[in-house]
Amino acid sequence: MLPRKTPWKTPRKTPWKRALTVLAALLLTAGATATAVPAVAAPAPAGAVTAAATSSGWNDYSCKPSAAHPRPVVLVHGTFANSVDNWLGLAPYLVRRGYCVFSLDYGQLPGVPLVFGLGPIDASAGQLATYVDRVLAATGAGQVDLVGHSQGGMMPRYYLKFLGGAAKVNSLTGIAPSNRGTTLLGLTKLLEYFPAAKELLTEKTPALADQITGSPFLTKLNEGGDTVPGVRYTVIATRYDDVVTPYRSQFLTGPGVTNVLIQDLCPLDLSTHAPLGLLDRIAFHEVANALDPARATPTTCASVLG
């Protein structure tokens, strides 16, 4: 039985300041790339970051899925992240549990090293499609399971819905996914009063513009239903999310959907947006349950020790 929901309040005394900081960071990052022309790079070739992941037990293309875990897991990072730093917690957690784990870089802008997830999201979904084919060819598996954080939990839905991914994917688990974008606690509405900033976001960092609530990309993605047949969907959210707001906008509706609020499992969990995907072992336990529901065990506050 799940713990009784407790009416916790956010510990943040000035949420508007936190949201303003996030919005400023987005605008400053866009400004830093103002001289670049947005483009989409192919998945990063094997190199320093891939070697770092392989040495930690994932992105090992000799890995063959076991009978217990017959599908490789593909991890999809969030905006401003990459295939290693987003997964230093979760990837080893899954490797230790016997999974073949892989991660990709996508959405790179020219002249912006190490930081990914900034290109047009529909094009990034095409990069994911190519990468999934690569993993399937290497492992001999028929399908993969996808796990993504933030943009990485939402972007695969485009692949599933429009690029034929449903036949190659068993499940999608989104950790704090931007399924309906974000209002940044309402501050994105201010962009209407600063057209130069809005144009900068759209032209120089397309993924940021695509993730604003009501964007043309999100309108297309969510038209006609959230899900596609044959794929299981899990959303893991935190009520203290300070990036994808309001947090309930992350939840999906439709067949095969499980929406999880982490505080319903552990009222003491105060994770915000980034820690939920980077560090939160309670969330990691729920990811493991989503990957293998037949062997799921209750997720509680004690899961932090697992």
Image (spheres, rainbow, N blue to C red):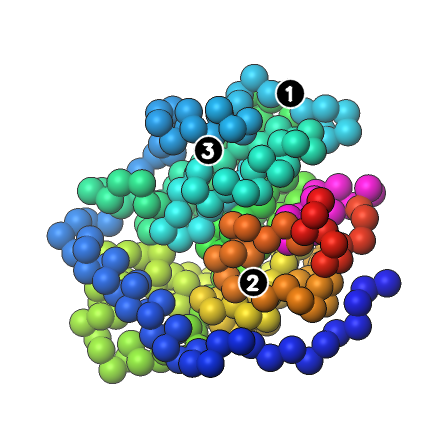
Please tell me which residue is depicted at 34% across the width and 74% down the height of the picture.
20
- Badge 2: how crowded within 10 Å, few (<14), some, or many (20+)? many
Residue 64 image label: 1
Whether residue 144 is situated above or below residue 121 in the rendered picture: above
Q: Main secondary structure of the magenta part?
A: helix
Q: Which residue is mark 2?
A: 271
Instruction: Name which of mark 2 and mark 3 comes first in the sequence.
Output: 3
Q: CA distance from mark 1 to mark 3?
A: 19 Å
The magenta segment is: 283-295
Q: Secondary structure at mark 1?
A: loop
Proximity of marks 2 and 3: CB atoms separated by less than 8 Å: no
Residue 32 screen position, x and y as percent: 19, 55
* Residue holding disc 3: 130
Q: Residue furthest right?
A: 1
Label 2 to label 1, Cα distance in Å?
A: 34 Å
Quadrant (top left/top right/bottom left/bottom right) for the N terminus:
bottom right
Q: Secondary structure at mark 2?
A: loop
Q: Nearer the viewer, mark 2 or mark 3?
A: 2
Q: Quadrant of residue 27?
A: bottom left
Q: Amino acid at mark 3?
A: Thr
* Above or below for 41 versus 52: below
